[in-house]
Image: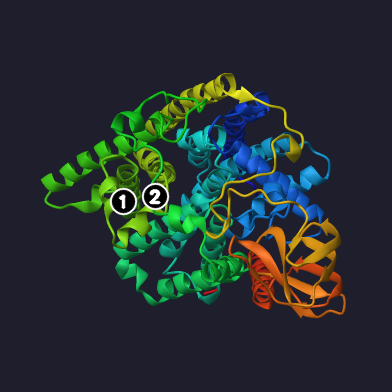
Amino acid sequence: MTDTGADRKKTAENRSGSAVACIIVIAGILLSCLTALFGADILPDYQDKLFHLRRLAALARTLQSGYFPARIYFVMNQGTGYAMPVFYPDLFLYVPAFMVNAGVPLGIAYDIYVILINAVTGVVTYLSVKGILKGEKITSAVIGFVYTLSVYRLTDVYIRDAAGEYTAMAFLPFVIFCFVRVYSDENKTGLRGMLKNAALLGISMALLAESHILTTVMAACFLAISAAILFKKTFSKKILITLILSVVIFAGLTAYSFVPMIDYMRSDTYLFNESSNIMRGFYPGWRELLEIIPSGSGSGIAYELRMPTAIGPAITAILAAWFIRTCILLFGCFKKKGDKKKLPAGFVAESILFAISAVSLFVSSKYFPWTRIEQSTGILKPLFCSVQFSWRYIGICTVCACMLAAFLITDIKMQSAKSGNVFGALLIILAVVPAVILQVRACSENGRAVITKGEEIGIVSDELYFPVSWNREARYDECPAIAGGEVLSYARAGGDWLLEVKSTSDETVLVFPVVYYKGYVSKTADGVKLPTMQATDGRVMVIVPGNYEGSIKLEYKESPLWKFAETISLISIVAVSIFLIVRKKSGGDGN
């Protein structure tokens, strides 16, 4: 075939568009990293940075001790141990944890993680929107820019330091893309295409689950609502099978983390079971949600006081522009007696995204009946209050509004390319100004501390995942205590204890200064298992036989069920990866 001038022009335009899109995405990522680059040592008061630095230090120590995957941070809370990894996903923290073990200072490793997540957010958003818009690069880059610099996301990153939540926000656009793909490809997708759609949706939700459980729950609820709205398509054979397969794939990918969590939740009662029904912090009003320049920097701002909760002017402009334009279009259709030809092709998707944005914004505010729900005794209380902070829903509003903007800009460009470009440029400006101001304030108004190792901050944690029986006020000696006997010597390596003990003629009790979690086992020198259980104050208690003199080893071991779950997840990862790689190489939809 000959290369025509039109082909060369199209190729040049495509390259130019790719270059511009690349510049926009990179600019958004760099602007989102101002605080990480120039204020790396900021330490907001009353927020979560110390908490996550301690998690990171504890995870690094646990991995260094040879425990993989980490299930208990044995060094945490004065060495009593803490099963945070079972309840709170830490998969992505393995990256900075390995950095710490390679010699990178703790604070710098965390800031590198922040930069990496900012980059992932920009790239994932760009690729997700590009997939929805069938290859439109400039618009996709604009949305990636706006979302990466969105006020709520940067508040999560630099003020709240909510590592789990801002990590999850990086994958929310991917979840929406995968969900839209399932519903847009139903007529041209064969069996292998259905499997691919199911795999992508399952992977996207798994990435979310390994970042932040509450964000996953919120996203799943809104996906379920969307599926219910689209019930005619949802209950078509291909889409229903695809959705069911995605759930199966999700279960396989996350089995290694959810099986231990469910196992622990069934085996004991923890403090988070009691606190999860309590809402914390204030409920923002419209003034706080819609302020142009977000007030507050996080310096000394406790949860019950004022902190930034604005959605930002870019998100406000998107929602307002779509609402006004849609009202005009619907009025035009009404005047022409129901002529729907003027409505854009993606109007249903746009309407759902706008509705979810509006609902999530309403739920995040003080106008939602939070107080009444807190005082209720039915299922609504644990269902709604488990989110802990009402303004978490702003994250859902932000991502849905940004995806809505992708459709909106495309619609405007179809009428006038110049108008679409102007609107996109306006969104970029509206995103940059508050993002830069927020980061400058975060750098200038917060405390600073150079942190190189966990000892400088004390490897302690919150208490949410302690069993309710644990005596949090007591300070136990490091040496295990034995009633009616003697501990001759003891040594500890990670979660393993090796003791030399001498008991009396009667059966006696050996108590370790360790929080009891299911999985601790003890043996004598001959390999005989000893009864290991929870003491009344929540410590690990071992029953030592009478007239015993010798060594006793206490160690933490995963159950066969957990090992099986890990195997399932490993098989799922390998199988899904092979399928997607082979599918990409073969091409086509497999009709």
Describe the element under mark 1 as helix, strand or loop: helix
Earlier in the chain: of badge 1 and badge 2, it is: 2
Describe the element under mark 2 as helix, strand or loop: loop
Residue at image coords 46%, 36%: 152
Query: Who is closer to the viewer here, 573 or 351?
Result: 573
Query: Who is closer to the viewer here, 186 or 550?
Result: 550
What percent of the width, then of the height, locates residue 246?
A: 51, 69
Residue located beneath label 2 in the image:
278
For the N terminus, which image quadrant?
bottom right
- Please state if 4 lies on the left or on the right of 548 as rendered: left
> Is 241 placed above or below 305 here?
below
| Residue 404 visible within the image | no
Residue located beneath label 1 in the image:
374
Mark 1 vs 2: CB contact within 8 A: yes
Amino acid type at circle 2 is: Ile
> Is 167 placed above or below 23 here?
below
